[in-house]
Image (cartoon, coloured by chain):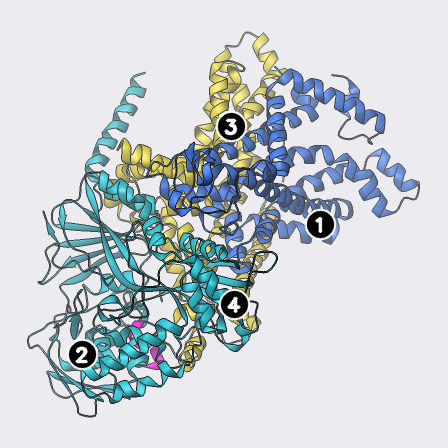
Amino acid sequence: MWTFIVRRLLQSVIVILGVTLISFISLQMGGDPTYLFVSERASEEEIQMIREALGFDKPLHIQYLTYLWNIAHGDFGNSLSYRQPAMGIVLGALPATIELTIFSMVIAITLAIPFGVFAALYRGRALDGSIMTMAMFGQSIPSFWLGIMMILFFGLYLGWFPISGQVPFLMPLFQGDFATAFGNLPSSLYHLVLPAVAVGFYSLSRNSRLVRSSMLEVLGQDYVRTARSKGISERAVVVNHALRNAWLPVVTMIGLEFGFLLGGVVVIETVFSWPGIGRLVFNAINQRDIPVVQASVIVLSVIFIALNLIVDLIYVRIDPRVKL
Amino acid sequence: MTDTTDTLALAPVKGSNLTRELGRAWRSMLAAKWPLLALLILLVVIFVAIFGPAIAPMDPNRQNIMMRLAAPMAEGPNGSVFLMGSDGLGRDVFSRLLYGARVSLLVGVAAIVVGGTLGVSAGLASGYFGGWVDDVLGRLGDIQLAFPFILLAIMFLVVLGPGLFNLILVLGIGQWVTYHRIVRAQTLSLREKEFVEAARAMGDSTFSIIFRTILPNIIAPLTVIMSFNVASVILAEASLSFLGLGVPPEVPTWGSMLAQSRDQLLANKWWLAIFPGLAIVMTVLSFNIMGDWLRDFLDPRLKERG
Amino acid sequence: MSKTRSLFMAATASIALAQTATAQVSDDTLVVGLSADITTFEPAAISSRDNANIVRHIFETLFSIEGDGSVVPDLATNLAISDDGLAYTYTIEEGRTCHDGEALTAEDVAYSFNRAKDPANAFTGNTPGFVFSSVGFVDAVAIDDLNVQINIAAPNPIAFGLLAEVYIHCKDSYEAMTLEQAAASPVGSGSYKLASWTPGSEVVLEKVADPGTFQNIIYRIIPEASTRSAELMAGNVDIITNVAPDQIDAINASGTAEVQAVQGTRRMYVGFNLSEPFAAMPGGDAIQNPDVRRALQYAVDVPTICEQLLNFPCVRATGIVNPPNANQSLTPYPYDPAMAEKLLDEAGWPRLEDGNRFTIRFQAGKGRYLNDENVVLAIAQYLSDVGINIELDVMEWGSVYVPLIRERNVGPLFFLGSGGALWSPLYDMTDLAKVDSGTNYTHWSDPRWFDRWADISAAKTPEEQRVIIDEMLQVFYDDGPWLHMYFQPDFYGVSNRLNWTARPDEKVYLFNATLN
């Protein structure tokens, strides 16, 4: 088990190096970013001066190696547009994104289980039909469109939910300000509903279908039939036997799901003015703010890799058939 | 279910078998109804993609800005009719929808071809050769998965510039890992099968074994993934259009039409969103239903239950 | 069952709580919705309009330019310009204090200028990058507590207005801060100070002195146009900028807010790149001929573009200068495609068998100007209607188009806007101060324009100067390097609870906004 973890961690370092290299190269290929940081009437000398100040005058491999050297010393560089430590900015935007991702993951997974289970139990009936229709549509609607429609309908027309914006919960929590954090919590959750549904709806739909089919498969297995024939109540059969096995494929999904939801966050953060890492990194890519892009990419990869590792370890616990 | 179907995915493909399987597929589809409808819709979409330009009543890029945002059935230039209204530049939504079928489908299918080719080749190599080849490709896949795909796409498109070709390339690259993993797993198990060993014993070249013996036997599970993937690629294209990284503005795709409609949603110009939106939903839905059906059809284990 | 019920109760209770938390904005707070992010509070690094609009509430300037172009004193009470036009001596008002409690003196003013210039700081904002390079800033010296002398390299008729754009900040505090700290903690002498800043989300200002009606001003970053409009209509935001033209009617119909449409000063045009490398490109040779350029002026229906795509009636530009200062004898080119075709025929570019006269590339950025992508598409349509085969190349604004513009390698046709002003025609004309000016993106080199700058400097009276200006503008109108478009309108959505009037120069100052 420990060798497994150590091996995975070593592999992760390689993966993260690769990730930074790829983002570095692709951004540098986009040409000289200096012009984004000089004003309209700057002279050639001024432009050259800024180029040197930003470090874009050096050969690429030197820039990259310098960058790695600095990272090794915990220096992720300063954001070119904010002129502040890039890692600080990224970590400042991270809690908002984690809130959104976790909440949408909760929607995508916890709701998917009852949806899928009930659809399977009532296979072929109206409940199954409506859940599966919803799931089919959920997998066919682009999230930005769903987001804007929800803003206009639930936010503006009905006035049930806030239209946009975020109330921080995790941020004060991380800072140790529990009073503010929990004071904010209700309002924070309230602001999360629409964007989280917009992010998670696609996954909710896919997972509902996944749970349904794995549930159907389990219900057809011998041990469930045996349990039924023993006269165990239907409810107990479902809870103790079928459900336990049916949600295994969902657990495997969690790790990948997180990465997938993070992707959707880029779009939805723009629609809902959510001050998270998705919008930050999108702007940073457009601005060629390489330090911020790198810091975001590193943070996201680390989270993603760690999460997948944890998921693998949990999987071992809940599925005795799997050995490391 | 009989034994013959059980070995469908794993047995060498023979001609007579194929005809019989097609017949069985047709009967299964007839029985399930929904896949039949999905197939019908897809055939219509493909028909429109091919013959759209001949059906389209107007030039999809002809602007009439004096007649912008005309409602469906409103009168267009020279006595024509905007069947589905006109967009923000007075272009005919119906004609753009027809042309859009071609581009959207092209993006979806071409991206799958790019991703599939990369992924299948990598998967075959990984599975068949193993060793360092497998290690390197596996690590590359990890790198890509550690990275939300949309970020990679944004980065590449910002750098390469948006455009049909770049878009297809990026969406394709985004898909290869899935194929790599599946094909690798399949190849690993096939490598040890008797008919592969037999081919090897008969002195077939490695190339021939991989492409003549192994590849045909993993086509079936691949088609399932492909049909789901076309759906997700069409959606990804819409999201990238929303971020301003899709096709050039004069090229109509359903995704870009939907993205362009977003300023008009507040102003109640519903036709700008509803028609391309429906086109996407119907097509994506059909691909998904087909994928479901194909999976059930090819995996007899699932057919037994219930 | 009881458990479920209590859970449900808790949920409703928290929603009720939350609703009070998001209720209408309080009376001492003004909320502004902006489309673009704010990146810095470093006075010497500010370059974007939105950023400058916020910061202007924190920092004062020596003089201040009003919306109508008139100039009023701000920090300074008096300005004396030396006879050679190289030394500007400002007298600042006594008794001003910085937010850090120190008195604001001439030393602080001199420091603000010199600090922005210091190469060690590598600042790239409007002050060093635009003001200093335009006026040829040399240095600033504090003569005594209240007088400061600014030295420039060459006489410049508009230096006075440009120097009024420099933000004055407070020496003691800035000397104690690193550049990183300074970027997030502005110390000025304006009526507001920064209370909090969440990058990508919001900026909160707090009032510390007059003038200013509201105790707090909150700027929220809301990039998506529909979301911005929805927040305004729901009453959560008081002012939004960059209203999408197609959403104006919906906002006006909402009963909670109105859109103020203002004729702005930004000059929108299609440039003709006349440089040698571009002359060698397809179509590049055609536009070398002023007759072809003039013909194309007739081909584009600018008023219709404004009305349909910008939802704003506009008068077509006659040149590079904003209407009040333009050559009044010029009339805008009418939309006359037949005339365009005739002139193109005469210029030696008849329609060929395929119906096209010549092929030319048309480059543009998107997402920067009002409805720019659609405007560009419409222009392309009009040009192709008279037989020009347009190869449209619409690019991402910041990372692809801007570098091309800066390198003056864009074209042969390109779409661009250039910020203008009402207080002097020369401000608008300095885009083309020299053939090799960084802002002469067209590489236009007509001596009938460029040789006249010497005459302007030599002119003794404003009347004499005006004659020369009008002659230059006539040349620009006839044979210039721009296909004249329009002056960009600006749309501000303003809540009905607020009494505030938008200005034409894209400046959003909220000092005298009041509740209705």
Circles 2 and 3 in contact, beta carbons < 8 Å: no
Disc 3 chain ID: A
Residue B293 at what x, y percent from top left?
A: 63, 25
Camera-side mark, 4 or 1:
4
Residue B221 at what x, y percent from top left?
A: 69, 33
Q: Secondary structure at mark 3?
A: helix
Cα separation between marks 4 and 3: 43 Å
Q: Which residue is mark 2?
A: C108
What is the letter of the cyan chain?
Answer: C
Residue A281 at what x, y percent from top left?
A: 43, 55
Camera-side mark, 2 or 1:
2
- The colour with which the image depicts chain B is blue
What is the letter of the yellow chain?
Answer: A
| Residue B175: numbered disc | none
Circles 4 and 2 in contact, beta carbons < 8 Å: no
Q: Which residue is mark 3?
A: A136
Question: Which image quarter: residue C435?
Answer: bottom left
In magenta, the rendered stretch is: C118-128
